[in-house]
Amino acid sequence: MALRFEELIKRHHDENFAYLWRLMGNDRHRDGSMDVEDLTQDVFLRAYDSFAAVRSNSNHRAWLYKIATHCAYTQFRRMKHQRDQLSWLKHSVTELETASDDSSLRKDMEQRGRALVNELPAKQKACITLRYLQDLDYPEIAQILGCSQESARANVYQPIRHLRLALEGEK
Amino acid sequence: MTTQKSKNDVFVVKHLRSALGSPTETALSSSRERVRKWFAAEAPLIQWGEMNSPLGPLFVAINQRGLCALDFGRQESEFLERFDNRARLERDPKAVQRVLAQLREYFAGDRSNFNLPVDISVLTPFQRSVLDVACRIAPGQVWSYQRIAKELGRPRSSRPVGGALARNPIPIVIPCHRVIASDGSLGGYSGGSGLKAKRWLLRLEGAI
């Protein structure tokens, strides 16, 4: 039986929300979840409009990720103030560097990682999130981003190298 | 060197995972609820139900306009597959009880015509006009495909008439079984078990 839209929501809402939440860099110290709710709603709205044209044997999961990635890219472009947000994050990292207890140290590490990821180009951010947070394989990532598997691999390898060097530099 | 590098990469990935983290269940359920509410408001609602009939399991479905689907002698999944896959399907015996009650009366021989709003807007104007004419055939009577074609002012369109009747989404209620070939043979029937069901219905109505 062909997949119904209602079932599509049930199966894929959570992972798409999580993907966008990670991609948009929502900081747990700020209430940014509303933006991600808007985006998630937008993803399903777009999916609904074009659902009739999708073949029943398609990979619906990859198709939704593709829509979600497009929505996120559009949002990135809209967010001209993103740099201000980044500088806010960097500032708070510096502040937290003085903290000494374990939980603060962990938060400090997380924020530093978060800030480093935020600085990455959109495609690299999408690639590493899809690969390591959403646990997708390279053929699927290539399908979602409309690129070759080699390009998907490169867009995972480069940011990982960048993050490794940045973290080594901080040691 | 490579081993050390890959060890470092494992550390980087671990670091990345904890830095990007996961949304809370509260954030997830809030978004889930919002999408669910939007879908409930946006998607057309189709309520359906079923009954046992002399022709096998019988399914009916209604939308906002009225009865939009009826089928019998098939599996539930086959019946549900016909609907727009964006529609919201709800199994709701109460919503369709009026339809089922009239069908029970019909099968018991206590009803010859149905008094139900129907929706055949998915069909073309020609198909709708064919079914409108079929609704004028009284129980116990049979018309030929050609007679319907003539009624429509298109005497050479017997074959398209047959095609339109085959697309009838609500057989029995729209009595396409009352249309047979000019030579007296039954012609075709796409409901349930095909001609066997058509013969059964015509016998029930005393037409043959």
Image (tube, coloured by chain):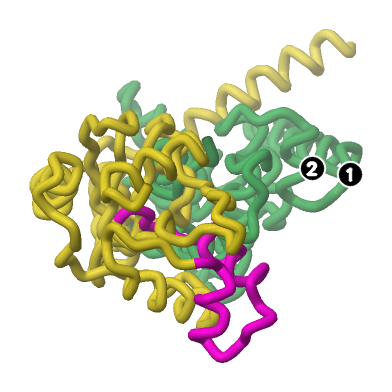
Chain colours: A green, B yellow
Which quarter of the rendered picture does the C terminus of chain A lie within? top right
Quarter of the image holding residue B68?
Answer: bottom left
The residue where tag 1 is placed is A148
Q: Is B125 situated above or below B16?
A: below
Q: Which of B41 and A83 is in front in this view?
A: B41
* Amino acid found under the numbered disc labelled 2: Ala
Q: Do labels 2 and 1 share a chain?
A: yes
Q: Where is residue B14 in the image (x, y as percent from the top left)?
A: 57, 22
Label 2: state its secondary structure: helix
| Residues in magenta, as a range | B144-172
Q: Position of residue B139 (x, y in %)?
A: 27, 60
Taking the magenta stretch, the answer to whether it contains residue B79 is no
Which residue is painted at 42% across and 54% down in the image? B177
Q: Which mark is first along the chain, 1 or 2? A: 2
Which residue is painted at 14% across and 45% down in the image? B109
Label 1: state its secondary structure: loop
Q: Position of residue B151 (x, y in %)?
A: 49, 85
Q: Do the residues labelled 2 and 1 touch (CB within 8 Å)?
A: yes
Q: Can residue A89 be seen in this view?
A: no
Label 2 chain ID: A
